């Protein structure tokens, strides 16, 4: 009964409200002013009574229209309800004279309404009103026509002759596809215009276009509050106009800057004897040496300095040929000197004309033999934006006089040394003159994975709770089935079902309903599901379907070759076409699809590792691993370093965690020029082998190639647990487990003998156990909470948010190590150094 009363009351209330809820539909438009200048703008507000509607603003052709959003409201007054929607736009005039805003059409629920026509007077001069005089904005650019790679400065100036508060952007200038970077600080100064003193606030942006074309910079919209004194009655002026009793009010105002267009011309084709440096601007190069006379075996520092304005930050070390000695002792000129490069030092300033500064490269030269040497002038080719042509400049030649040294004379003729005497001061001979060689022994294939946290805790508890140790060990040590393994099992299931269902039955069952699990549709459905599962397994994701584009993205991220990606995505499209095309499939076509599906699954390396599509004995699996390893070694020695990295990474996808394998991957990537992934794999190897000398040497060499430098930080925990960086985590884990068994064995013996446990040796064993356990726990915590990553992309923009429209805060380059604070929607919040925090895509920074 109560429910009936509630329903009756609700029905009566609704019936009373419906007539009053107005179904009226009206649209009106108004502007904030009707007389403006070409440097000003109009704010148009369109109000729709009755709720939101679709507006047609295409009729406005004499203004550039910029949407400023919408709002809605609901009012209930005197028994009547009213819905209202308001749309706001900024109109920027495109010409002078009498400009019209034609009637705007609004459509809602098949109802149409129009606004009235509005006329705006636009003049060349600033309109003579208090507001126009008091407030306006102006945008300028240093050069409207530039070359690709040339820099220009965009200046936005805000002029005001009245007291303001709360100045800020409602809409910053939109540079669209034009790369821009704001100056760190804004400028504030005064300027007199037509006898009026204005306060000027100026913001600058550095524009660095890399591609030719015509770019339009949309105007900026600024908002502020003009301070207006309240008006008092004249009779109270003598008393209430005192500043203590005076009151002020604020009037909100908006101003819009003018749009600008920049034309970016492409660089002309370069033809010359030297290599183009990529520098665009105006530059100079100088070379000097700190000493011109020295002995063989001593060191001299050669300094190359590139200075100028333009993209100086992109300057690299120019090519410099080493001179030949004046004696025919050497076959190649490179053997006359040992060369050691230092990290470049740059001094860069952001000025009103763009980037200016210098970049200094230093090389330590150690002559091996005596003689008189002449270093040929070093050439620098850059594009001169003033001349509009390529310029080649040279340094002065450098003369070096090297006197003989007794030790070096012995090095010149090693055959003259006695058999039992070693050569004096022999330098380290590096293969390929950069890094130490890869490791080729079978130890590379040994599993060095660390003990999992749960297993470690179990092993530590066994001596104390031995009666439950075996059962708990079996339960905890079992690994959870990963998503990759689940999808791999699903792929195997669907492939087996496809083999059982067809293709032998497709011809005989083509008359059956096409949605059954038997016959052609069941066969094709299982083939499709097996391919989808195997592709998703590579991405470690669950799902039932993928598009060809999604499959292509997943396989590219998994570093599958492009030709194989085309084969896999083409096979997916072919199977879907056969499923839904409506044509009957013959047995030959079905056999081909089944065969190609098996090949693709084997190609993705899941047939041997996860699925067992072909029955392989453990010996066969080990043979395949050895074959892949051998192929990687051959590719490395053949100079195909990129392919070697791919082969070695295939081994890393197996359940093999080995520091020497990771070391080889790092070597291959470093040789192929991929500094980011080289350091990534070196760091992964250092986790398991922190004191390997070859690894530390090559990692130190790779660090010299990283562009981003930061000050090293010393943490308290690193000082207290310094040995943690000298011994691998697994070694510490084993030591902790051994100390646990040792302590509890000692404790058991002491209990049997009814003696004190914590005396003498017992306290020592307990202290070692506690200390090692604490180190292991700290390592686990650092690994799970203090994640670190390495930038693998050549240049990465670190932004203030996770969208591409977020502000670019700074840039990092390949090989830079960062700390990971948060993961969100395919992005990482990273910390490079103090005060340098932002977001990057997770594919640009891979976690160590």
Image (cartoon, rainbow, N blue to C red):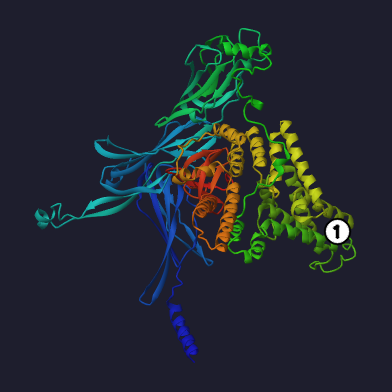
Can residue 822 be seen in this snapshot? no
Query: x, y (%) of residue 435?
Result: 62, 30
Q: Nearer the viewer, residue 791 or 354?
A: 791
Query: x, y (%) of residue 271?
Result: 61, 21
Q: Is residue 807 above or below residue 46?
A: above
Q: Is residue 702 above or below residue 821?
A: above
- Residue 182 placement, left or right of 786: left
Query: x, y (%) of residue 721?
Result: 49, 45
Give the number of callouts.
1
Q: Is residue 637 above or below residue 756?
A: above
- Residue 271 placement, left or right of 506: left
Q: Which residue is mark 1?
A: 585
Query: x, y (%) of residue 179?
Result: 50, 39
- Residue 492 placement, left or right of 80: right
Q: Is residue 75 above or below residue 71?
A: below
Q: Nearer the viewer, residue 414 or 63?
A: 414
- Residue 262 placement, left or right of 127: right
Identify the residue at horizontal 60%, vertical 47% (top origin): 731
Can residue 506 be seen in this snapshot? yes
Q: Quadrant of residue 204?
A: top left
User: Given the current orientation, which residue lies at the most extreme bottom position?
Assistant: 1
Looking at the rendered structure, the secondary structure element under dot 1 is loop
Characterize the local packing of mark 1: few (<14), some (14-19) or many (20 or more) Cα atoms within 10 angstroms.
Answer: some
């Amino acid at each position: 009964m109560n429910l009936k009363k509630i329903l009756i009351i609700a029905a009566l209330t609704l019936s009373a409200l419906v007539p009053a809820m107005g179904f009226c539909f009206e649209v009106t438009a108004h502007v904030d002013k009707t007389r403006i200048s070409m440097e000003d703008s109009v704010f148009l507000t369109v109000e729709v009574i009755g709720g939101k509607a679709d507006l047609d603003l295409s009729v406005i052709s004499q203004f550039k229209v910029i949407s400023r959003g919408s709002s809605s409201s609901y009012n209930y007054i005197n028994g009547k309800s009213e819905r209202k929607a308001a749309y706001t736009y900024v109109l920027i005039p495109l010409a002078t004279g009498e400009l019209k805003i034609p009637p705007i059409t609004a459509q809602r629920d098949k109802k149409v309404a129009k606004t009235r026509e509005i006329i705006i007077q636009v003049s060349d001069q600033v309109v003579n009103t208090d507001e126009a005089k008091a407030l306006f904005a102006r945008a300028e650019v240093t050069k409207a026509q530039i070359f690709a790679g040339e820099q220009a400065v965009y200046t936005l100036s805000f002029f005001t002759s009245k007291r303001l508060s709360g100045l800020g952007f409602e809409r910053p200038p939109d540079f669209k596809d034009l790369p821009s970077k704001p100056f760190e600080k804004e400028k504030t100064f005064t300027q007199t215009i037509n006898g009026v003193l204005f306060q000027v606030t100026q913001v600058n942006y550095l524009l660095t276009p890399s591609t030719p074309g015509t770019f339009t910079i949309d105007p900026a919209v600024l908002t502020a509050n003009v301070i207006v004194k309240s008006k008092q009655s004249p009779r109270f002026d003598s008393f209430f106009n005192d500043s203590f009793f005076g009151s002020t009010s604020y009037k909100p105002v908006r101003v819009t800057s003018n749009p600008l267009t920049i034309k970016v011309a492409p660089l002309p084709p370069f033809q010359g004897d030297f290599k183009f440096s990529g520098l665009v601007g105006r530059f100079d190069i100088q070379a000097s040496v700190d000493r011109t006379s020295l002995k063989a075996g001593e060191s001299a520092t050669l300094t190359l300095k590139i200075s100028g304005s333009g993209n100086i930050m992109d300057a690299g070390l120019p090519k410099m040929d080493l001179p030949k000695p004046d004696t025919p002792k050497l076959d190649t000129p490179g053997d006359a000197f040992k060369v050691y490069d230092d990290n470049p030092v740059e001094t860069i300033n952001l000025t009103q004309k763009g980037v200016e500064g210098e970049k200094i490269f230093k090389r330590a030269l150690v002559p091996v033999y005596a003689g008189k040497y002449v270093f040929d002038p070093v050439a620098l080719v850059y594009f001169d934006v003033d001349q509009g042509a390529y310029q080649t400049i040279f340094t002065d030649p450098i003369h070096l006089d090297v006197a003989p040294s007794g030790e070096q004379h012995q090095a010149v003729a090693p055959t003259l040394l006695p058999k039992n005497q070693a050569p004096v001061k022999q330098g380290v001979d590096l293969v390929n003159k950069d890094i130490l060689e890869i490791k080729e022994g079978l130890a590379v294939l040994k599993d060095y994975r660390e003990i999992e946290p749960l297993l470690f805790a179990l092993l530590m508890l066994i001596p104390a709770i031995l009666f439950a140790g075996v059962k708990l060990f079996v339960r905890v040590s079992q690994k959870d089935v990963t998503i990759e393994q689940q999808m791999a099992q699903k792929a195997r299931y669907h492939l087996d079902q496809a083999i059982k269902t067809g293709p032998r039955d497709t011809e005989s069952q083509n008359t059956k309903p096409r949605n059954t699990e038997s016959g052609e549709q069941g066969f094709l459905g299982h083939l499709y599901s097996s391919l989808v599962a195997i592709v998703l397994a590579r991405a470690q994701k669950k799902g039932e379907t993928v598009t060809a584009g999604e499959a292509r993205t997943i396989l590219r991220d998994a570093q599958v070759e492009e030709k194989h990606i085309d084969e896999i995505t083409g096979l997916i499209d072919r199977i879907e076409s056969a499923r839904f095309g409506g044509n009957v499939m013959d047995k030959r076509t079905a056999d081909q699809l089944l065969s190609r599906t098996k090949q693709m699954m084997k190609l993705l390396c899941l047939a041997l590792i996860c699925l067992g599509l072909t029955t392989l004995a453990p010996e066969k699996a080990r043979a395949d691993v050895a074959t892949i390893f051998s192929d990687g070694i051959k590719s490395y020695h053949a100079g195909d370093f990129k392919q070697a990295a791919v082969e070695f990474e295939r081994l890393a996808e197996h359940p093999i965690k080995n520091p020497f394998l990771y070391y080889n991957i790092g070597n291959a990537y470093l040789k192929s020029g991929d500094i980011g992934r080289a350091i990534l794999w070196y760091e992964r190897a250092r986790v398991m082998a922190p004191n390997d000398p070859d690894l530390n040497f090559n990692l130190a060499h790779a660090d010299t190639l990283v562009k981003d430098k930061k000050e090293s930080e010393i943490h308290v925990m690193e000082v207290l647990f310094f040995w943690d960086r000298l011994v691998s985590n697994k070694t510490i884990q084993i030591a902790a487990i051994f100390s646990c068994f040792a302590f509890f064995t000692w404790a058991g013996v002491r209990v049997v003998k009814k003696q004190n446990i914590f005396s003498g040796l017992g306290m020592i064993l307990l202290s070692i156990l506690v200390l090692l356990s604490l180190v292991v726990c700290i390592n686990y915590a650092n690994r799970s909470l203090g994640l670190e990553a390495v930038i693998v992309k050549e240049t990465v923009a670190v932004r203030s948010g996770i969208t591409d429209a977020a502000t670019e805060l700074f840039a990092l380059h390949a090989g830079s190590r960062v700390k990971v604070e948060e993961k969100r929607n395919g992005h990482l919040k990273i910390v490079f150094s103090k005060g340098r925090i932002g977001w990057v895509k997770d594919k640009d920074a891979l976690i160590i």
